[in-house]
Image: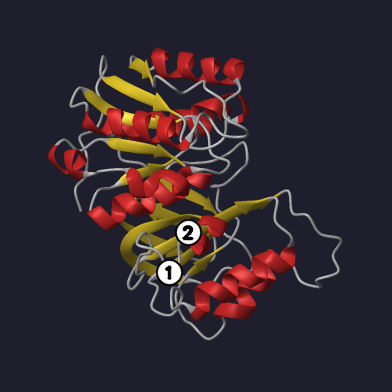
């Protein structure tokens, strides 16, 4: 894997929108945060455009991403928000310049598709908070994100959960939004997870749909040979409890035949605490009676 250079004060970075249209006020707040980190923020030409629910047409969104990839002075690219739209443009993007001039691409949710595409090309990315939602992200997560971008080695230590499966795992860390991971199965963006530590999160789903997606991962072979599994936050669940079991019980039901370490309630997802995770970097996961430690 290619690990892009970490950032330094004064670096030029790009801000683009590959999915849903932006809220200008919240996005400008996020840009101010990036500037406070000492970064020179270059906003994509079409970032504040609107086309139906999208941040501009597919062509406009693809042009902005391509421009930021191709510009060797841009040291990192921040997707301003997710929603839906990145998979509509991903096949239009040429990544050859990224291999010649590696840079961090940062985001989560819908941006999971781009992070997986980077992984296919052998370039690491950051599953991280996005500037349009910095206002709804806690200081701990923003400070953690900054540290990751500027090359500070970051370990995550959290309290253990009663349903965790203890053990140790080593492997390349990969993951993101469960819906998007399922959405890209059978496409050129699909990846193999043999030996990986996989993390998943989601928002606004009903329990039966979460069950269906976990079943899909299992049937597609993505759970069979994992080194470890991290279950992040599944927030804003839309259900009346008629399904009968919760998210953690769903995961347990479909992974009880495997013996890889399993951690629940990890601080990553569509919540105020959303810690940055590198997609494509080697990691170690330790789960014991008192804590969970993820080291990247």
Q: Residue at 55% across / 59% down in the picture?
A: 178
Mark 1: secondary structure? loop
Residue 201 vs residue 244: left or right? left
Q: Is residue 50 visible?
A: yes
Mark 2: secondary structure? strand
Residue 253 vs residue 187: left or right? right
Residue closer to the observer: 175 or 184: 184
Q: How many marks?
A: 2
Q: Residue at 46% across / 75% down in the picture?
A: 223
Residue 133 higher or lower than 172, as above or below: above
Residue 233 vs residue 230: left or right? right
Whole-percent x, y for residue 290 in the image: 54, 60
Q: Which numbered tag is attached to residue 186? A: 1
Whole-percent x, y for residue 94 in the image: 25, 43
Residue closer to the observer: 214 or 23: 23
Q: Nearer the viewer, mark 1 or mark 2?
A: 1
Residue closer to the observer: 209 or 3: 209
Residue 78, quarter of picture: top left
Q: Earlier in the sequence, mark 1 or mark 2?
A: 1
Q: Residue at 36% across / 16% down in the picture?
A: 41
Mark 2 highlights which residue? Answer: 199
- In three-dimensional space, the C-alpha distance between marks 1 and 2, rounded to whole angstroms, equals 20 Å
Whole-percent x, y for residue 128 in the image: 45, 39
């Amino acid at each position: 894997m290619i690990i892009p250079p970490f950032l330094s004060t004064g670096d030029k970075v790009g801000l683009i929108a590959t999915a849903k249209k932006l809220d200008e006020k919240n996005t400008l707040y996020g840009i101010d945060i990036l500037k406070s980190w000492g970064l020179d923020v270059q906003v994509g030409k079409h970032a504040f455009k609107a086309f139906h629910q999208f941040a501009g047409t597919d062509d406009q969104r693809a042009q902005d991403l391509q421009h930021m990839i191709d510009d060797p002075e841009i040291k990192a690219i921040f997707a301003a928000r997710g929603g839906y739209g990145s998979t509509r443009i991903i096949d239009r993007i040429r990544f050859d310049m990224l291999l010649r001039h590696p840079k961090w691409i940062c985001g989560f949710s819908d941006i999971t598709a781009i992070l997986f595409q980077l992984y296919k090309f052998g370039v690491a990315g950051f599953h991280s908070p996005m500037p349009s939602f910095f206002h709804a992200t806690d200081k701990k997560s923003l400070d953690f994100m900054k540290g990751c971008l500027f090359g500070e080695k970051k370990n995550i230590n959290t309290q253990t959960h009663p349903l965790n499966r203890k053990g140790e795992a080593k492997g390349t860390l990969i993951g993101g939004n469960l819906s998007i991971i399922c959405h890209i199965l059978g496409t050129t963006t699909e990846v193999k997870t043999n030996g990986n530590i996989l993390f998943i999160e989601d928002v606004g789903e009903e329990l039966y749909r979460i069950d269906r997606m976990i079943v899909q991962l299992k049937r597609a072979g993505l759970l069979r040979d994992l080194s470890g599994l991290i279950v992040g936050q599944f927030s804003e669940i839309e259900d009346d409890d008629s399904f009968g079991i919760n998210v953690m019980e769903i995961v347990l039901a479909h992974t009880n035949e495997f013996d890889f370490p399993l951690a629940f309630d990890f601080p990553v997802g569509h919540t105020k605490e959303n810690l940055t995770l590198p997609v494509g970097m080697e990691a170690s996961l330790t789960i014991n009676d008192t804590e969970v430690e993820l080291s990247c």
